[in-house]
Image: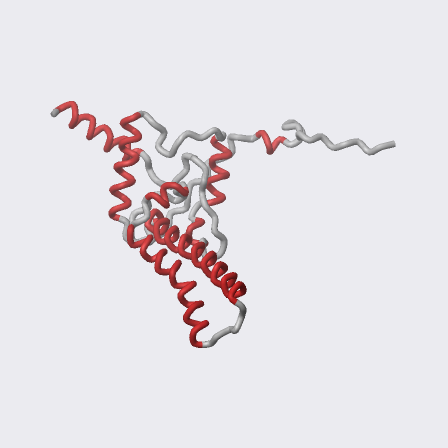
Amino acid sequence: MAAERPPEVRSVTEYSALGQTGKPFVPAKGLNTDYPLIDSDPHFKRVVSYARPSDYLASSVLLAGGPALMLWWEKISPSEVSRPGFSSIMRLSGGVSLAAGFLLMYQRSINRFYGATENRRELEMDMREMTDRVKKGEPLYGVSTMTEYMQGVASRQSRYSGFWLHVVPWFNFVNHNQHGVDTAKYYRNAERELEGERGS
């Protein structure tokens, strides 16, 4: 007699944890930093779009540095490999340098969201972006199709992950509502601007 095939969809009744969506809210832990926190779990797009020209410059230097170092080593101590072999080495060093350059740019940008480095420009950009969203009636952190509980799960998976980017590159691609800041400031600023617009 053939063994019964296990069900592909597990019952929420049997596995009640799968159906729970009302677990307690877990707030983001505050860090003792020299600058204000902007976002404890910024979306990938925000981190890249908020990057400064100096971040891209540092990234470009690192990108060019890898292949340049390989050429310099080849010049002072020839490897005597064939041309196709050396081309493979250059492609590999270029690929590694490209990844390292991107991670450097991302690390520098996300540290400003955490308040780990000077972030006056990013604070102003964040306030402008969020205030405009409030005035347009849009969700602050984008539309999400996930439950509140799953948004919390997503947040806890990548919260402050930028500090460990050199160990495990881990990014937030999820729109959720848990970012470790009091969003009331955006609504207050939007109200002030709307009152000013009505008064003028």
Q: Is residue 164 above or below residue 19?
A: below
Residue 19: give x, y in percent of width and height.
Answer: 58, 29
Q: Is residue 34 left or right of residue 177?
A: left
Q: How many numbered callouts? A: 0
The residue furthest right is 1
Q: Nearer the viewer, residue 171 or 65?
A: 65
Quadrant of the rendered image containing residue 15: top right
Q: What residue is drawn where x is 27% and y is 31%? A: 132
Q: Nearer the viewer, residue 102 or 133?
A: 102
Residue 54: give x, y in percent of width and height.
Answer: 29, 54
Quadrant of the rendered image containing residue 44: top left
Q: Is residue 94 left or right of residue 127?
A: right
Residue 78: give x, y in percent of width and height.
Answer: 48, 75
Q: Is residue 128 left or right of residue 174?
A: left
The residue furthest left is 200
Quarter of the rendering occupied by the N terminus: top right
The residue furthest front is 83
Q: Nearer the viewer, residue 72 or 28?
A: 72
Q: What residue is drawn where x is 69% and y is 31%? A: 8
The residue furthest top is 198
Q: Nearer the viewer, residue 93 or 38?
A: 93
Q: Is residue 126 left or right of residue 153?
A: left
Q: Is residue 142 above or below residue 169?
A: above
Quarter of the rendering occupied by the C terminus: top left
Residue 147: give x, y in percent of width and height.
Answer: 49, 30
Q: How is the image coloured?
A: secondary structure
Q: What residue is drawn where x is 16% and y is 26%? A: 197
Q: What residue is drawn where x is 36% and y is 51%? A: 111
